[in-house]
Image: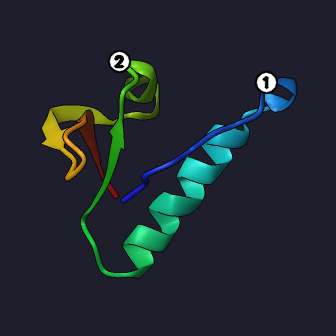
Amino acid sequence: MVCVLFIDKEHRGNSYGELLINQAEIITKKGGFKYLNLCTSHIGLYKTYGFKYIGQGYHPWEEQSRIYQIEV
């Protein structure tokens, strides 16, 4: 599961986020898992990488996150 992905403003636009997601997919697949999940408050951003929204998640500290999933 990807929990935090942050690219500082001065480094955005260099596809670093995509590189990190690709690495997470490789590691997930090598680990024998079929899906990579991520939690985020962003709407739509990760759909550009092939993730599908699967529902809301609830944290112990009472915040909510959107849960996205991609098959690896």
**How many numbered discs sit on the rendered protein?**
2
Q: Which residue is situated farthest in the right direction here?
A: 10
The kind of residue on which mark 2 rests is Ile
Q: Earlier in the sequence, mark 2 or mark 1?
A: 1
State how far apart marks 2 and 1 are (Cα): 19 Å
- Find disc 2 in the rendering and name its residue: 43
Q: Quadrant of the C terminus?
A: bottom left
The kind of residue on which mark 1 rests is Lys
Q: Quadrant of the N terminus?
A: bottom left
Mark 1 element type = helix
Taking the spot 62% from the left edge, 52% from the top edge, the residue there is 20
Mark 2 element type = loop
Taking the spot 33% from the left edge, 43% from the top edge, the residue there is 39
Residue 50 at x, y percent in the picture: 37, 34
- Find disc 1 in the rendering and name its residue: 9
Q: Nearer the viewer, residue 25 or 56?
A: 56
Residue 22 at x, y percent in the picture: 56, 53
Q: Quadrant of residue 65?
A: top left
Q: 41 above or below 31? A: above
Q: Nearer the viewer, residue 26 or 55?
A: 55
